[in-house]
Image (spheres, helix red, strand yellow):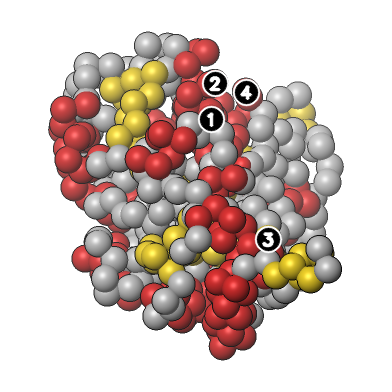
Amino acid sequence: MAIQDHVHAPIETPPRAPSPTHRFGTLAVHAGSPHDPVTGAVIESISLSTTFAQSAVGQPIGYEYTRSANPNRANFERCIAALERAKYALAFSSGSATTATILQSLAAGSHVISVSDVYGGTHRYFTQVASAHGVRVTFTPSIEVDIEELITADTKLIWIETPSNPTLSLVDIRAVADIAHRSGVLVVVDNTFLSPYIQNPLEHGADIVVHSVTKYINGHSDVLMGVAAFNSDALMERLKFLQNAIGAVPSPFDCWLAHRGVKTLHLRAREASKNGQMVAQALLDSPHVLAVNYPGLQNHKQRKIALKQHRDGLGGGMLSFRVKGGKEAAERFCQATHIFTLAESLGGVESLVEVPASMTHMGIPREQREAAGVFDDLVRISCGVEDGVDLVADVRQALEKVVVGPKIRNGVAYGHA
Ligand SMILES: Cc1ncc(COP(=O)(O)O)c(C=O)c1O
């Protein structure tokens, strides 16, 4: 059965998982982290075995075969379910594999509505892969306004990124879910940019929350992985079946590393968010900057949504800004920073900077890109957990270099190494 064969039936948002007794930090450290019952080891061992002994034919002692389930994956999934306030979580070999598995759960002929400025790889999957198995995706830059008009009899899924990548616009999850659920449509939220510490989309009515674990959850830029969390038993049955049948599963070692990483998520996310706020303010105060996109700023056009959906109204570690001087200035800025590394990705302990139009979002046609606010002069920043004062100083000195531009001495450019 594909997700939502019961077309048009309104969806009851499944009951929340029971409220945990403990708070986020305690769950991050302890959920899915049992002591080893034999050795007493406080940290789980890495279970590399691909197969597991059975006591009689068809009677596994514990696990069976590592693609179907593995102790490290199961422990990591338990932890993420606890942090997303979900009943279930399933891990995949990447964020993209998570997206692909959810889309493959739809029957041919299904229709999906997505926000326009999704992650470039999600856009690529929606436009170039989903269509090959008969799933059509409509993009909209203003989902809260358009949703009712866009839902058709075939619509099965709504795909939201909030904050969006890379323009940091927000979507009111509850407003969209209320309308979607009336028509029997499920809502998926990609929560990669904020992490479960800052936002729990299921609490606002979403049916599935997905993450590129590669980012904040692992947090150390050394694991590629994805996860989906949800409350519905029917979704568990369907997605667990596909996790095994498609087989896009993470290795035990990656699960172990990501589980180790997530234990400090609350500390990292708080610090990255504090740095994001400081850097955004410095950019806002700079005469060299055209506009700053950061949901922690009072002038963000959807600040009210941030106050409603984000823990303590935090803005997170991600921001973007338009620099005066166009594409060249944006590229020069990224080469002029000393602490921020020019690289794709985000959510690690180290700060990164990139130009989406020429890097992560290059595959999206210019017209569509610009309609979503992704201009050539837009720079995206991922704040890490370095000292915020140093990050602000780095941004300021790089902006000064951008304004001066390349100086020519004896025919050789210098001054913006
Ligand atoms: C918001 C968002 N979702 C999904 C993905 C895809 O995740 P992965 O790179 O783990 O496949 C990314 C990757 O950058 C992302 O930024």
What crowding class fits label 4: few (fewer than 14 Cα within 10 Å), some (14-19), or many (20 or more)?
few
User: The C terminus lies in which quarter of the figure?
Assistant: bottom right
- The spot of residue 51 in percent (x, y) is 81, 35
Whichever of callouts 4 and 1 sits on the residue coming sooner in the sequence is 1
Q: Amino acid at mark 1?
A: Arg
Can residue 19 be seen in the rendering of this structure?
A: yes
| Label 3–label 1 contact, CB within 8 A | no
Residue located beneath label 4 in the image: 245
Q: Which of the two discs, 1 and 2, sits closer to the camera?
A: 1
Q: Label 3 sits on what residue type?
A: Leu
Q: Position of residue 39 (x, y in %)?
A: 81, 67
Residue name at image x 26 percent, y 71 percent: 299
In this figure, which residue is indicated by the disc labeled 2? 129
The residue identified by callout 1 is 124
Whichever of callouts 3 and 2 sits on the residue coming sooner in the sequence is 2
Q: Quadrant of residue 240?
A: top right
Quarter residue 413 falls in: bottom right
Q: Quadrant of the N terminus?
A: top left
Q: How many marks?
A: 4
Distance Cα–Cα, label 1 vs label 2: 7 Å
Please determine whether, in this image, residue 401 is positioned above or below residue 330.
below
3D distance between C-alphas at marks 4 and 1: 23 Å
Q: Which residue is mark 3?
A: 342
Q: Residues within 10 Å of mark 1 (few under 14, many from 20)?
A: some
Label 3: how many residues lie within 10 Å, few (<14), some (14-19) or many (20+)?
A: some
| CB contact under 8 Å: marks 4 and 3 | no
Q: Nearer the viewer, mark 2 or mark 4?
A: 2
The disc, 4 or 3, on the residue closer to the chain's N-terminal end is 4
| SS category of the residue bearing label 1 | helix
